[in-house]
Amino acid sequence: MSFELNYELLVGLLVLTTAAWSVAARDSYSAAVGFVSYGLLLAIVWMQLQAVDVALTEVAIGSGLTGLLLLGAAARVRAAEARVVARPSIALRTLAALACVGISVALAATVLSLPQPAPSLAAEALAALPATGLGNPVNGVLMAFRAFDTLLEKVVLVLSLVGVWSLAPESGWTGRPRLLHPFADDGVLRFLARTLPPLGLLLGLHLMWNGADEPGGAFQGATVLAAMWLLVLMAGLGEAPQVRARWLRVAAVAGPATFLAVGLAGMGIAGAFLAYPEAHAKTLILFVELPMMLTIALVLALLVAGPPERTDGT
Amino acid sequence: MNPTTLFGLCGAALVGIGLYGLLTDPRLLRKIIAFNLVGSGVFLLFGVVARRGAAAGLGGDPVPQALVITGIVVAFSATALAVALLLRLHESGGGATLDDAADGARTDRSRS
């Protein structure tokens, strides 16, 4: 066994340990903290699998934003969860454990018997890439070859925001999301919230612009922007917008709407839905990516902020 | 065994760990966390398939990689909606668990 494999074995074990911790931890807050570290470790695994774009997404969304969401929820339901007295009986838990081990073993057997040589679309994707004007094959797949998936993914984002907003209590309807400000008096957080956003803005745009040719993309860039906005909101330096604000609603649908419009135009000028004329492919992709980035950043931050719960100005 | 297979086995184990939490923990927030573990285990299996498809000078097949990125985003949307449902249930007095005993205790208290 080489040193390399020892390192990978260690990373794998750490991933499994943090995963087991976020299931077994007594307190949900600890479980959420475990889940954040789990996401960070999983990103290392994605790096080992040569999937830098996925690692960036995992770290930003899987670990960062999901973690923030879970930590906030854990703090709010802590008292109610303390009342839990009964777990399923030992017999039931053993049965569940056996079933889960069975499923894991079946999956492991599948992994060990994957076809050799492995099927791959890498060569095809790379061969068709010049037509898109992009240099990053993952982004080529996202924005051109499987653009339909990406379009629907944006629609899912907007729909889940509609779902979250629909859960507003009657008193908060059309008001502002209640972001907890537990650290509003924290000098360090306020300092960071004043210092980081310009850098974050630059980094986000850099990720989006360079995502055309290198790892990154509109999605990862937008997540950085969303994080900067959330930082400002959590430090109490900014106010979450009222969800009835017209600009907010327009911005929330700007991305998918532009994408859809370009896609429909493709039927006329390139002969198929979501097709780009070859000469202008890259320009059109960037034209779609800019409003998409705005939508993603806004929707991600608002999903974390939760449903509107207060109508007053403060 | 090569590293890719190792991570594949890791993904298989993650699905099992997550599923166990989903089945046995009565707390809804823990079910959401466990479900995310199952999801990331499935993504990891996908990542292994992508890595095995390395060809033409690329480190992995970009098609499954792009699908995983889309999947992570959709999983986040679903988690955000689930957390919002949980908090709404909690704040409207419906509790935060599926534990009958805890629910019974709460009902008794509200009656008295």
Image: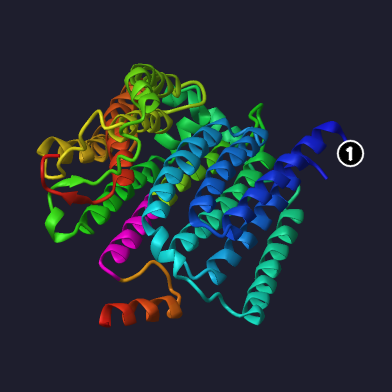
Is residue A2 visible in the rendered image? The answer is yes
Q: Is residue B107 above or below residue A280?
A: below
Residue A284: give x, y in percent of width and height: 31, 26
Which three-letter amino acid code belongs to the residue tagged 1?
A: Met
Looking at the rendering, in which quadrant would you find the N terminus of chain B?
top right
Query: Magenta segment, principal secondary structure?
Result: helix
Kindly state the secondary structure of the residue where label 1 is placed. Answer: loop
Residue at the image position 26 percent from the left and 56 percent from the top: A163
Classify residue A111 by image quadrant.
Answer: bottom right
The residue wearing badge 1 is A1
Q: Is residue B83 magenta?
A: yes
Q: Relative to the observer, which residue lies in front, A149 or A40?
A: A40
Label 1 crowd (10 A; few <14 / some 14-19 / many >=20): few
Farthest residue toward the right?
Answer: A1
Q: In the image, is residue B107 above or below residue B89?
A: below
Residue under the image location 33 percent in, 17 percent down: A198
Question: In this image, A143 relative to B112: left or right?
Answer: right
Task: Give the percent coordinates (x, y) of residue B98.
Answer: 43, 74
Q: Please, which residue is most extreme toward the front here?
A: B112
Vertical order, A279 against B62 (above or below) = above
Residue at (28, 69) in percent of width and height: B93
Magenta extent: B77-93
| Left or right, residue B59 beside residue A281 | right
